[in-house]
Image: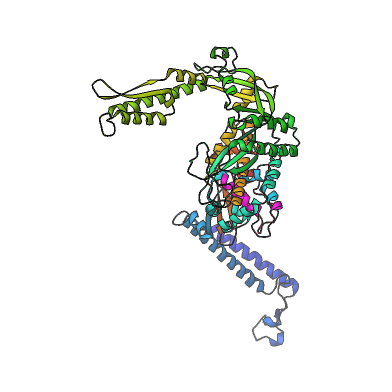
Amino acid sequence: MYFTTNRRWSYAVVWCFWFLVLLTMAWHRGLPWVTVAPAAERAPGDTVALLVVPPSARGTPWPWQPQGRWRKWARARYQKAQRTYQRAIWAARGARLLLHGALTMATVVDWLTRAQLRRQLGALPVLYRLLEILDVRRIINRHCPSATQVDHGAVVVVLVLNRLMAPRPLYKVADWLSQTVLVTVLGIPAAKFNDDRLGRTLDALAAHQRDIWLDIVSQALRRFNIDLRFLFYDLTALVLQGAYSDSQLAGYGFAHNTPSGKQKVKLGATASADGAIPADYAAHAGRTADMATVQENMARLCRLLERQGQPLSEVLLIGDRANLNDELACAYVDQGLKYLAGLQPRKKAHCELLTAVPERQFYAHPLTEPAGRTPGDFGLPTVITFQHNGRTLQQRCLVVLSGPMRRAIRQGRARQLQDLRAELVAVQAKIGQKRYRSVKDVQARAATRLRRSPVGRLMSATAYQTATGAVALRWAVDRRALFNAMQHDGRYLLVTNDWQLAPQRMLALYRSKDALEKRFEVAKQDLRIRPLYVHSDERIRALLLVNMLALLAYSLLERQVQQAGLHVTTRRIVEQLEGVTVIETHCHDGSVLRRLTPLSAEQDALLTILAALLAQIALIDLVPTLPAPPEPAAVRLFLPMQASMA
């Protein structure tokens, strides 16, 4: 325990101890600064006189200790350390007060930040990596070299990604690009991608569009191991906007689901049954008939298959009813191609073949199982004869009776007959009014209704005058015409020169051609290939190349995902990853911090699957970290995702 008295006594004992030590040391060393005065100098009565030597004449009193300057130095340093320590304490107290009181961490970060940007990322890592696998940029730069900062390959990559993610007109591509991470990835300002530069790139592509497509699609077929044994061929029409006075492509012509009063260009495409991957395409004038493109497509397709090393004897080309007639049947044989196509019965012999067999005989030859109460499909194999330029060919034919198609046709006909009856009732109700007072007028109005109705040939209407002189109208269904029409309900012809195909296989392959039609829907709706706003044939062809490259990437990604067991479309993948963004923080010292927004569980799982699909090259990170300026060679897009997530 501490006591004040003990402290005083301890001080006294310490001082006495040190006093004795000093006296002892002074005695033994002679103390040069203390001397005894001689007797002659003593005053009377003095016993002993001490002579004190001035400080200047003394020696060092303590040999191990300098003369006192160290005390001043140590004291100064001690005082300075004390002041620094006190300042640090007060600074910490002030910072704690500010951060927990009036000043927040967000305010401090705001002081340090010069700008903060939010850039869209979405599915860019996957799609960009897919275009790298296809080697799009390098192939285009090889065919269309450029010494400018913005090479044509980079422009095409931007256009393809824009088609896949957020289709925009050419003059709005730069605005979209400025909101994405592609600005950092490519190392090129978004303003460089104006519509003039995009137009110059389209002009450069036009001269080499066929060679570019062949190189890129060869890369796709080889890298993804696409099966080319079964191919689909079909055409679609794309509406054009603007004036095309000297165009060889733009023209008015007939095409399903397109307005007749608009100029259009037709696109013929060949796709594989394996994933509906577009393997070839060609642009045709809008007034070109579908059958007029088949032989040209056959010759082009044969060159492509030879380039891929695919034997023609193992290939089956599948088309619709617009791809076969007597002349084309001979052309397939001359080219050495096997085909399977529907046949529009125009010749009398072909029409008789379609209705020669009674309906009951089909039921013994089922092709598919019935769906509920709706009967399935039935088919009778037979032989069909083609004649052209003195040549006669016999091919295998399958007369198909489709239960679902027959039911749909008859239900539609019943609705049309009911609508026609309602129109004739309306004509009858107007008898006696202006322009409905004579038999001739009423007959003319009824004939107009019959002519405009798709089932008008199945009904007759007669205006007559009654015994009282009144005008009346009567109508009735032509039963014989209705019976003849019902004989064709649900029936169609399938023809092939492959005698090894079983009837069930023929029907299954023919129905699978709808995959190419769905690709056309993707091109028109998701990729928005139509309407086209460019005003020259060269740019039309180049823009079709860009859209077909986008459709190729779309189809490849969808094929790989579905083969992995995930039944989603590429459009769904793009929509799921649409919310993924990168936050760029630019500080006043010039440094940039890029952070990925948090991923949801669905996005994380989807990216994991996509990483496994692109097995040869790991899925690259979402945050770009490129050197500045970028290298002229192809640059990598992202760092590994695992590093950024950590």
The x, y position of residue 471, in whole percent, is: 27, 25
| Residue 599 vertical placement versus 504 (above, below) | below
Report the side of 365 relative to 302 (left or right).
Answer: left
The x, y position of residue 576, in whole percent, is: 54, 39
Question: Image point 27% across, 30% down: which residue?
Answer: 437
Q: Is residue 155 magenta?
A: yes
| Residue 81 vertical placement versus 394 (above, below) | below
The x, y position of residue 170, in whole percent, is: 55, 52
Can residue 182 be seen from the camera position used here? Answer: yes
Between 96 and 48, the one lying in front of the other is 96
From which residue to which does the magenta span run? Answer: 141-163
Between 37 and 86, the one lying in front of the other is 86
Chief secondary structure of the magenta portion = helix
Report the side of 415 relative to 32 (left or right).
Answer: left
| Residue 306 vertical placement versus 364 (above, below) | below
Question: Image point 25% across, 29% down: which residue?
Answer: 432
The x, y position of residue 161, in whole percent, is: 59, 47
